[in-house]
Image: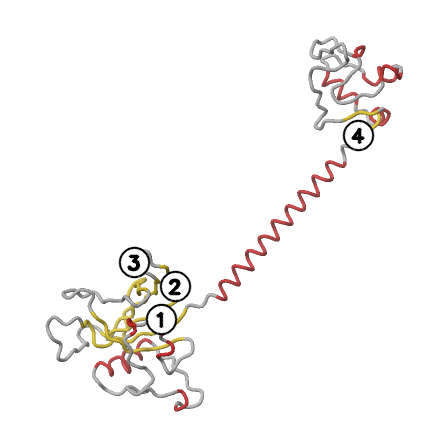
Amino acid sequence: MDVKSNADLPPGFRFHPTDEELIMYYLRNQAKSRPCPASIIPEVDIYKFDPWELPEKAEFGEKEWYFFTPRDRKYPNGVRPNRATVSGYWKATGTDKAIYSGSKYVGVKKALVFYKGRPPKGVKSDWIMHEYRLISDSRKQPNKQNGSMRLDDWVLCRIYKKKQTTKTLDQKVDEESCSQRINKIGSNIDAIEQQQLMKFPRTCSLTHLRELEYFGPIAQLLSDNTYNFSYDFQNATPEHVGKVQLGEIPNQYTTDSGKFQVSPSGIVNQTVFVNPMVYEFQY
């Protein structure tokens, strides 16, 4: 069949036929050796090529390409078509769609996806094919010899590459938005923790602690007896007080409850925790 180039077509011509039109005006005419309304669909055995090689075989089309192609049998006595190509194979997906002209059932549309490699370890690609074929009663295969591998003289195939740009951009926007929300939540948590830490200074003087009345709660932690640390420290001499650090307390300020024992060096044998943080006291 002679393929008419784009330059010979009317200005502004676009080829967007419906499923019914492809069956009734193109595939049926091709099967009966009748001329098509427009000679823009070439005859190509698409299974001898990989899908990315097919656009250059078509003289018409920018984002989708149409071909008349024969189908061969996969097995001599079977009815399954052989869909293997040079670098992969076409795999059917979904269910077949019946095509009607009015109320008359005239053809079938099948969707296929191209996989690189060999089954069952093929890698799915973005290449899609819609295969149109006539129903059994409408197919006529003259001069068909017994034992031939030819399954159909002609089917009509529409091939295109699935668009991924829009989906990829939407996923990227969603991921960025999610990441921003997570970072914002993390920043708020850090700010709250910083504010809480600022409320509890790690180093302060005894005078400051007495003014804040820290010794009252500490005394309750150190002894069952409500021991008045403020009174003792107010009456203690400087040589007795010295420098009070974590885990240290003068011998004369030990409690009678037996919970804490002081060694001769003045070191408490049990760690003291202040609610809820550990402090270092400096005089």
**Identity, as a three-letter code, of the amino acid under mark 2:** Ser
Which residue corresponds to the image point at 72% horizontal and 26% vertical from the top-left? 278
Most foreground residue, 22 or 241: 241
Say if mark 1 contacts mark 2, CB within 8 Å: yes
Say if mark 4 contacts mark 1, CB within 8 Å: no
Q: Earlier in the sequence, mark 1 or mark 2?
A: 1
Q: CA distance from mark 3 to mark 1?
A: 17 Å
Residue tagged 4: 203
Q: Earlier in the sequence, mark 3 or mark 2?
A: 3
Q: CA distance from mark 4 to mark 3?
A: 71 Å
Label 1, secondary structure: give it. Answer: helix
Residue tagged 1: 51
Residue 141: quarter of image: bottom left
Say if mark 3 contacts mark 1, CB within 8 Å: no
Q: Is residue 26 left or right of residue 56?
A: left
Q: Earlier in the sequence, mark 4 or mark 1?
A: 1
Residue tagged 2: 125
Callout 4 crowding tier (Cα within 10 Å): few <14, some 14–19, many ≥20: few
In the depicted structure, whether residue 24 falls above or below residue 164: below
Q: Position of residue 109 (x, y in %)?
A: 29, 70
Q: Earlier in the sequence, mark 3 or mark 1?
A: 1
**Identity, as a three-letter code, of the amino acid under mark 1:** Pro
Q: Which mark is residue 119?
A: 3
Q: Disc 4 or disc 3, which is closer to the eye? A: 3
Q: Position of residue 279 (x, y in %)?
A: 75, 27
Which residue corresponds to the image point at 72% horizontal and 36% vertical from the top-left? 196
Label 4, secondary structure: give it. Answer: strand
Q: CA distance from mark 1 to mark 2?
A: 10 Å
